[in-house]
Amino acid sequence: MKSLFRRRLIVAASCVLTAIQAPAFAAESTISIKLSHVAAKDTPKGMGAERFKQLAEERTKGRVKVDVFPNSMLYKDKEELEALQMGAVQMLAPSISKFGPMGVKEFEVLDLPFVTPDIQAFRAIANGPVGQNMLSKLEVRGIKGLAFWDAGFRVITANRPLHTPSDFKGLKIRINSSKIIEAQIRALGGIPQTLAFSEVYQALQTGVVDGSETVLSNVWTQKFYEVQKHVTLLHHTHQAYALVANKKFWDGLPPDIRTILEGAVRDATIYANALGEVEENEAMEKIKASGKTTIYTPTKAEIDEFRKATAPVHRAMESRLGKANIEAVYKATGFVLPH
């Protein structure tokens, strides 16, 4: 019933929005864009969204007005893509893991364990043919893929040290909705739990889950460090978002406005991605300074153990992701599957 009620709300919002926007593309009218996301305003994604707003409004000389809604103010994880498809919002910046459940599984290849060992490997995918092909796959779902945004490497939080795969045994770990990440946690002996991002702090605080798979900027801005004693810099996958728009809305923009907004997307992407590493380092220092959480960097030998423990995930997911798709990523990143 709740899901049906939410859907009706979204439909109602969409109808109101359509009525409001009917004359929006007239030459002298203001074009309104709602950009919704689930992260805090002071994360790389949050600041990237604000940068896009600034550039779009300045460069169109007020013909475009962008309202940014951070921290799940409008929609939670499970609701936002449906809201975008129905036109209740015009732009989002969701985690790429969210595209798998809606049938665009190609994005999940970036969730394969240790496939992007460094930022250069991630950008080789995001900025190359593999990444652009992924974005194009969204169009059949009524979504225009605009860019990839980088939020740094994923880490694991818990209330006990996680130095080896055996340390994960029996732990309930909150994850994004991703079959690949789910398989990784199970390969380590953990119990994956999918929760809306806005519910994670309380779930950690009350023991509904024992830990989380996230990024350092979220550990800091969402205050996970207050309720988790340990953070392991496992860096097993890269947290990536996709800046996307409602395709009908984007394609219907006046050509001159769309060209300006494409430039704003490009420059906001450069800005947001440059923040990723800086924010990651700053978040780490702030978490350390709090004195509430121990940050642990695994040794090379420990990382090799994790790589071997999760290697079967790569083989198991060939039927889901496509062997050719996986091999294209291997080629782009230089990844070699451990034996």
Image: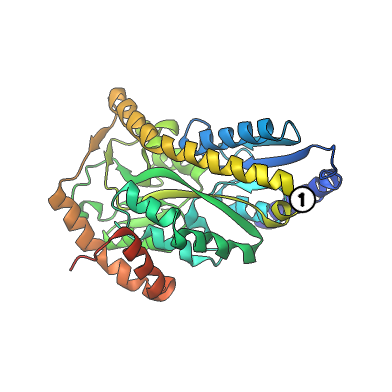
Position of the C terminus, as image quadrant, is bottom left
Q: In the figure, is residue 108 to the left or right of 210? A: right
Between 4 and 320, which is closer to the camera in this rendering? 320
Q: Is residue 89 visible?
A: no
Residue drawn at x 20%, y 65% is 338
Q: Amino acid at mark 1?
A: Ser
Q: Looking at the rendering, in which quadrant would you find the N terminus? A: bottom right
Q: Residue at x 44, y 43 (%)?
A: 203
Residue displayed at 86% across by 45% down: 23
Above or below, 200 against 145 in this view is: above
Q: 230 or 61, which is in the foreground?
A: 61
Instruction: Classify residue 294 as left or right of residue 180.
Output: left
Kindly identify which residue carries mark 1.
Answer: 14
Closer to the camera, 215 or 31? 31
Image spot of residue 57 (x, y percent): 68, 33
Secondary structure under badge 1? helix
Return the residue nearer the eye: 266 or 171. Answer: 266
Q: Which quadrant would residue 292 be assigned to in this image?
A: top left
At 58% across and 62% down in the image, what residue appears? 138
Residue neighbourhood size for the residue with mark 1, other residues' Cα within 10 Å, grouped as few (<14), some (14–19), many (≥20): some
Q: Position of residue 95 (x, y in %)?
A: 49, 50
Where is residue 335? Give x, y as percent: 27, 61
Using the rendered image of the protein, determine whether residue 35 is visible from the camera's viewpoint.
yes
Query: Image height check: is 139 above or below 8?
Result: below
Q: Is residue 282 above or below residue 137?
A: above
84 on left or right of 229: right
Give x and y (percent) for residue 101: 53, 63
